[in-house]
Image (cartoon, grey):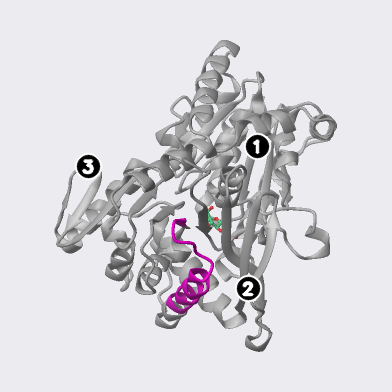
Amino acid sequence: MNAEKKRLVVISTRVPKSAILESDEKQRTKSVSGLVSALHFALQDIDSLWFGWSGQAVTKSRKAAPQKSCNGSIELVTVDLTLGEVDGFYTGFCNSTLWPLFHCLPSYVRLCQNAYQTYQIVNRDFAAILISYLREDDLVWVHDYQHIPIGTELRRLGWMGRLGFFLHTPFPPIDILEIIPQSKQILENLMDYDLLGFNTQRYCKNFIDALCKEFGGTFDGRTYYYKQLSVHCNAYPTGINPSAFEFWVNSADAIEKRRRIRESVYNRRIVLGVDRLDYTKGICERLLAFEQFLERYPYWRKQVSMIQISVPSRDHMPEYAAYKQEIDRLVGNINSRFSEDEWLPVVYLYRSYLQEELSAFYREADVCFVTSLRDGMNLVAKEYIASQSNNFGVLVLSKFCGASEDLQEAIIINPYDIYETANALKFALEMPNRERSARWQALMKRVCNHTAGAWRDCFLTDLQGFAIK
Ligand code: F6P
C-alpha cells in the first residue's frame, strides 16, 4: 500500500489496550485474539488510527468522552460502553446470536429483538463519534461481525471515502444465515462497503450465494451487482508475523521457559492445544480423541502428555461456563483413568499467556492439535509452524478451520470423528523425520507467504484500486 499518502483508520471492538485484562492476577497477561494480533502486526509501520471499545463497562452517567492514547506508532481512540450496551451489544447480539450463527452452530443461537436494537444503536453511536476523527482521504477499514452496520451509518452521515470490511469469522451458508430474522438487513449493511474481505474463498462464496438468493443480481468473479449497487468481494487470508515468533522463541526467557516445560512433562513427547475457551474450538472433541488415542494405543501411555492451554473468555455467559465445566470433567476423567506415578496425561492450564511465552510452548510441542468445529482462520496453527524453526513439529488441523484452505501439508482431520482424530494423532507422533521436515518446510513457506503484512497490503491495494461508489 502507499502508506505515506493515506492514513489507515481501523475499527474493531477489541483494541490492543483492552486486550490487557484488568484483574491484578491477570494484569500481565493478554487475551488471545486473532483479530488484535493480526491487526497489531499489520499497523506497526504505517500512519494509522485504531478506533474501538475501551473495554470499560460503566453506568450511563460515568460514560467518559472518547479517550485518545498511543500504542507504539498507532493512535488509539476508544469509547466506553454502558453496562446495558455490553449486555445487549457484546454479550447479546454479537456473542449469543452472530457468533454461533456465523460458526454454523445453530443450537447456540439466541434470538432477542432488544439485543439487535442495542447492536444497531452502539454501531450508530460508534459511527457518529468516528466521523469527527476522519480526514477526507483516509482509508476506513471496519473489522468483524460486531460492526457490520458501521458502513451504512458512515454513509448516512455523509462519508464519501473508501470503506472496506473484513470478516475474521466464517460466513455461513444462506440456510444457516436465514435462522435470524435480521439476515436481509445484515446483507444490505454489507453491500454498503466498497470492498468485503473474507478469510477463505468458501466464506466469500457463501456470501455471494446469500446475496444472489436474497436479491438476485449477478457476480462476475470479483464484483456483485444488483440494480445501482455493487460490492467487490474476495478472500484475503489473515496471517502472522513469522519473524516475531522466530525471534521470541530464541530469547533467553523463552529458552529458560522451554527447559521448564520439558522438565514438567519429564521429557515426554508433547501434544499441544491452545485456544480461547470457546465451544467453537472443539476442545471437548480434542480431549475425547486424546482419550481414544490412549485407549487404542496403550504403548503410547507414559510416552506423551497433552498440554491444553485454555484462555478464559466470555466466562460470564452460561454457555461458556457450562463448556468450561465439561472440559474440567473430561480432563479429570482422563487423568483419573490413565495417570501413573510421574505421568499426567493432560496438563491443563486455564489462563492466558503473552505471545512470547506461547512461543516457548509451541517450540517444545511435537504436535499442535487444532480441532475447531468451525474457525475463521486459526492463527495458532500458523504461530506453531513459525515457532518450530527446524524442530519439524507436526500440525494436526481441523478441516473446518479457514487455515486448512492454505496449510495443506498439515494432517487434516474431521474433529467430529474422534476415532479418525485419534489415528491422526498416532500418525503425527510416529511420522518419520524426513516427512516431518518436508511437511514443516512446505508449511513454513506458506506461513511466510501469507503474513499479516501481506494480508493488509493485498486488501488495501484492492480497496484503493476499485472505483469509488
Ligand atoms: O478474532 C476473532 C474474534 O472474534 C474477535 O472479533 C473477537 O474480539 C475475538 O475473537 C475474541 O472474542 P472477545 O472479543 O469476545 O474476547
Q: Quadrant of the C terminus?
A: bottom left
Q: Residue 66 carries which label?
A: 2
Left or right of 213 in this view: 41 = right
**Residue at position x 33%, y 66% in the image:** 189
Of the residues tagged 1 and 2, which is closer to the observer?
Answer: 2
Total labels: the figure holds: 3
Mark before the other along the chain sequence, 2 or 3: 2
**Residue at position x 58%, y 46% in the image:** 43
Q: Please name whichever residue, 54 or 57, is drawn nearer the observer in this view of the structure.
A: 54
Numbered disc 3: secondary structure: loop
Task: Read off the residue under disc 1.
Answer: 272
- Vertical comparison of 445 with 75: above or below: above
- Vertical comparison of 465 with 189: above or below: above
Mark before the other along the chain sequence, 3 or 1: 3
- Vertical comparison of 325 with 318: above or below: above
**Residue at position x 68%, y 46% in the image:** 309
Amino acid on which the number 1 mark rests in the picture = Leu
Q: Position of residue 376 (x, y in %)?
A: 45, 48
Instruction: Give the crowd class for mark 1: few <14, some 14-19, many >=20 residues within 10 Å.
Output: many
Numbered disc 1: secondary structure: strand
Q: Give the range drawn in magenta.
A: 119-141
Amino acid on which the number 2 mark rests in the picture = Pro
Q: Does the magenta stretch include residue 124?
A: yes
Instruction: Give the crowd class for mark 2: few <14, some 14-19, many >=20 residues within 10 Å.
Output: some
Of the residues tagged 2 and 3, which is closer to the observer?
Answer: 2
Task: Read off the residue under disc 3.
Answer: 221
Left or right of 269 in this view: 171 = left
